[in-house]
Image (cartoon, rainbow, N blue to C red):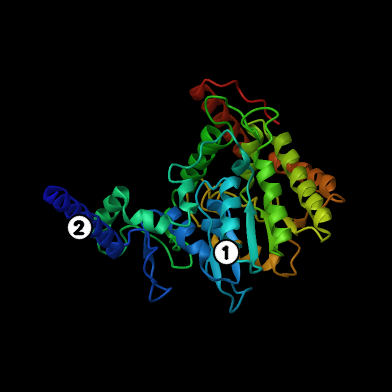
Amino acid sequence: MRYFSHFLIAALSMTAILAGFNWWVDPYAIYHDEASGAVPLRVMNERIFKTVKLAQTPADIVFIGTSRTDIGIGREQPALPGRRLLNLATFDQRIRETRRLLERVVQDGEPHTVVLGLDFFAFNALNAAPSDYVEENYNPLRQATLLLSISTLSDALAKYRRPQAGMGDCCYADGFRLESDPAHQSSDYRHNFVASERLYLMEKYLPYPRCAFAFATREGEVQSSLSDLRAIFELAQRRNVDLRLFISPSNARQWETLAAAGLWGTWETWKQQLVVLNEQEAVHAGRPPFPLWDFSGYDAVSSEDLPDHRGLGLMRGYSDSSHYTLEVGRRLVARLFGGTDNWGAVLSRSNIEAQLARIRVAQQQYRASHARDVAEIRALARETAHVKHCPEPGFH
């Protein structure tokens, strides 16, 4: 009996030490309130921080989406003075994760303004979830269970050993990412663009081994990425959320990459489904559909050229063909909240076909003036197909 009591006391003591150390170091920034929002956070796992803590933080406007929204939407938004802003966007965020985050944001019952970036690749059900995505993060007891986690201890030790600023900084307390100096990449644009396009061809558009894009993992499956989107619309209508949606303004080379993967028709179908689902749920709720902005395609913003062969000059709009800059992000946000320029189009059943046709015309004009870019991307598509042992793509 004495042995058992000693063992129990020792076990409880070790548990208390483990929990106390994890709480004190706080590697995920979920236990302590930050004294100043201007100080970057050192977070060992950004997804835990944004899911477990930040999604429950009071705010006026919440941004959700993939890395395009994470990187391109900054904390300084002149169009939104005095508003409390949060950025819950994360790298490789699938639409299922977007749905779960929205559910967490609105669970207190209060209406919110939510800006949702919609990206085609996030709807590919054949893509594996990001390695740091854990469904358990949505458990109401997650903060407590993480205190007793050995993986938390490992991250706490890593943070404790590297206390200096800059080591592991990810974002501010409102979730917005640290700004990077564009001068650091001024000589690497072509490398960044090609690396991004290779990644999309290898993993996001046509992942191995099926080398395909699908909205569901099996044909006829009821649960799909589009059903998750329908659930988002239904929840937002039911909870009176001011939901504002946009399709990201990636560079024109990204749309050529998508076409080189043979997915142009699927991309157009996806846009049509966005419109249909939005309007169907609006009819069910007896309310207007949510504004759905399309900033994709070929225009003065997205058709910005890479620097010349000497690599001189800075790009205003892009760091690679997928991710737009904070300058573009500010213009996008201003447009969503009443800006008067003529950039982008609000999609509806009455104009979707005309909008798709306009993009096709602009695509042909871009190809005529950017033959080198198009040839480079098509060669890359053939190369990645060979590496993955996939059928050679049929170019659109």
Res. 114 visible in picture: yes
Instruction: Please name the residue shown 28% across and 65% down the image.
Output: 24
Residue at the disc numbered 1 = 327
The image shows residue 370 at horizontal and vertical percentages of 65, 41
Camera-side mark, 1 or 2? 2
* Res. 106 image quadrant: bottom right
* Res. 336 image quadrant: bottom right
Q: Is residue 60 left or right of residue 352?
A: left
The image shows residue 197 at horizontal and vertical percentages of 54, 39
Residue at the disc numbered 2 = 13
Query: Mark 2 belongs to which amino acid?
Result: Ser
Q: Is residue 126 left or right of residue 111?
A: left
Secondary element type, mark 2: helix
Query: Residue furthest toward the left?
Result: 2
Whether tag 1 and tag 2 are in contact, CB under 8 A, the answer is no
Query: Mark 1 belongs to which amino acid?
Result: Glu
Query: Residue furthest toward the bottom?
Result: 82
Packing grade of label 2 (10 A; few <14, some 14-19, many >=20) is few
